[in-house]
Amino acid sequence: MTMPYWHWRPVSALLIGSVLISASFAAAQQPTPPPPKAAVDQSTMDLEQLMKIEIVVAGSKRAQQSREVASFVSVVSAADIREHGYRTLADVLRTLPGFYVSNDRNYSYIGVRGFSRPGDWNSRILLLLNGLRTNDNVYDLAYYGEEFSVDVDLIERVEVIRGPGSALYGSNALFAVINVVTRSGGSLAGGEISTSAASFGTYSGRASYGRAFANDLELLVSATYSDGKGRDLFYPEYNAPLTNNGVVNGLDHEGFHKILVTASKGDFSFQANTIKREKGLPTGQYLTTFGDKRTRTTDELSLASLSFNRALSNGASISTRLHTGRYAYLGEYAYTQLPPNHDVVLGEWVGMDVDAARKIASRQFLTFGAEYRDNFKQTQTNFDPEPYALYTDVRGRSARWGVFAQDEIKLAEPVVLYAGARVDHYEGFGYATSPRLALIYTPSPMTTFKVLAGRAFRAPNEFELHFEALGYKANTQLAPEHIETLELIAQRFIGGGVQISASAFRNRLTGLTDQRLDPADTLIRFVNLDEIRAKGLELALEVNRGHGPTGQLTYSLQRTEERATGAELTNSPGQMVQLQLRSPVPGFGAIAALDAQYMSARRTLAGNAANGHTLTNLSLFAPKAFGRFDLSAALYNVFDTRYGDPVGDGYIQDVIRQDGRNVRVRATLHY
């Protein structure tokens, strides 16, 4: 694996600055020792007990109970992931109210509340890994499939904060902020070796070691490898003798390896991760030669950060993070018998974040901070290697900074007001302001009401602004897009481990950046469109009695449309139903789980419809079998449902068919 080339001079300067800021703040305060960590057995807790200890960090950049967060929040635990046999982060998210997944047989795209635009590269959702931004600095791309930064078995919990998050996080936090929290070294308490085998010739393995040492050092090291041949596919759009009658063999292959290292000691913590993935493209994307095995993509993402976190007296705290990253992409697109066209992207960056919090009297809690990011390399190149022909060579560089503040005010004993705002500055278009207001009313420990209003933005990325090749042309006049939201939330425990939740929302998005074919030259260009409006309702019923069967049933209803025409957006399902059930298997010490998701029809780019469908998955998980083994088996798409996902420009196909019935078995040894 190619490891990132870190630019140590700017990193050293940021590190010194980070330490000085932390030291100067801490000097005025006397540190308060953190409370001892108590071992908590959650397996016997009912829903009310779990909700009281369910901690979310990403909502306000500090630890809160989920019901205190100014958002409709979902938390998926490590137990949920293991027992339901989720393979990817996309598998996790598709089970949550308002979320859905599309796939073009290269990447997984996350839709939320009816919004998933072709070619947006997941850029309207901010994805964090232990609070660190993972979206790259060229596409603003976030990985959710097998290409996600860490193995899902290393996830402790997934925090999903719906709604606009730009008041705290800046660009990309348009529809949601997702924070993936990894397991600590102490939670492993030794080593793990995991192997799995799945349909379509897919095999993977993971080796991990973690431990908490007596000197307060905690360490985790993990490496994962996977290789898959992929399935043979048929595309009727290519059903002709010259294109093998629409059949492709061995072109859907995928292989990756990823490494994660985390360490902490006292107030300091370090994390580094890297992923490299190679994926074959079987679809004939961008009018490449159908069936040519040389067409493929290679993605690499490496991130590293060093953090200092200290709790101080009087409810104060300080946190600083120095971080750096590198994103590399190589697309090899075969058009003739000559060597394939090369599409090369390289992004490198360094940055620093500073967050602080302080309690004011007994009724206010102030959170404030700043961040800076230097995108010192944003390179996009496209060329034919033989004979050499250069089509685009963009060598960009940019910087941005932002400051924010949020005040949490107890107006009365059951009423809390959140008021916050952030100002960002981007080279190229200047300033963006993102305010947020929320009112949380808790008339009893069993009932919570929330009223939320906010504004968020997404800056145009380097790809949208400057790329010119493979049927695209640049548009340097793109402006940021903005969203304004209003949301009402109600949550109620009704006893017996049962909770009901409801959320009604209205979104107004202006200046939407979208792909359009220019009729003058038939090239794809990103443009700012007219206003988009959306409204919807999300309902959830959750049951957890602390023993026996548990489950969740959710229903989502929404409509997202262009204001000028009233036309519904493409790839926007009007209704979704999700069901998850788990139950112990008497006498076997195992857990059986069922997942079912229904999605209504979606309009495609050509004006057709991708049919509605229901997917059903079954899994069986046996923990600590034979003392040291976790064994699991899962059957996906149990009823072999035929369905497809809409895709954007660059494909002959209007809909890309997805996998039918498939299986996976896995064994994990703890030692």
Image (tube, rainbow, N blue to C red):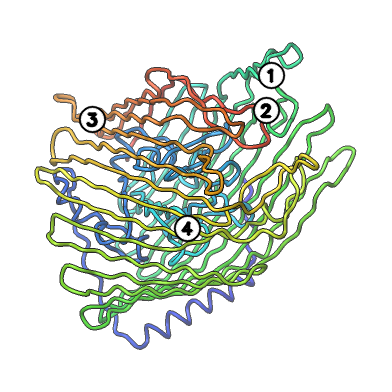
| Amino acid marked by disc 1 | Tyr
Residue 318: % across, % down: 38, 76
Please tell me whether residue 172 is drawn above or below residue 385 in the rendered image: below
Please tell me whether residue 556 is drawn above or below residue 429 in the rendered image: above
Q: Which residue is mark 4?
A: 173
Q: Which residue is mark 1?
A: 238
Say which label, 4 or 1, has the lower sequence index.
Answer: 4
Residue 207: % across, % down: 43, 41
Image quadrant where one finds the C terminus:
top left
Alpha carbons under labels 3 and 1: distance apart: 44 Å
Secondary structure of the residue carrying numbered label 1 = helix
Disc 1 crowd, CA 10 A, few/some/many (<14, 14-19, 20+)? many
Q: Is residue 337 left or right of residue 364?
A: right
Say which label, 4 or 3, has the lower sequence index.
Answer: 4
Say which label, 4 or 2, has the lower sequence index.
Answer: 4
Q: Which residue is mark 2?
A: 652
| Amino acid marked by disc 3 | Ile
Camera-near label (4 vs 3) is 4
Tell which of 249 and 458 is nearer to you.
Answer: 458
Alpha carbons under labels 2 and 1: distance apart: 9 Å
Say which label, 3 or 1, has the lower sequence index.
Answer: 1
| Amino acid marked by disc 4 | Ala
Camera-near label (2 vs 3) is 2
Say which label, 2 or 3, has the lower sequence index.
Answer: 3
Alpha carbons under labels 4 and 1: distance apart: 39 Å
Alpha carbons under labels 2 and 3: distance apart: 44 Å
Secondary structure of the residue carrying numbered label 4 = loop
Disc 3 crowd, CA 10 A, few/some/many (<14, 14-19, 20+)? some
Image quadrant where one finds the N terminus:
top right
Q: Residue at x 43, y 45 (%)?
A: 112
Q: Are marks 2 and 1 in contact (CB under 8 Å)?
A: yes
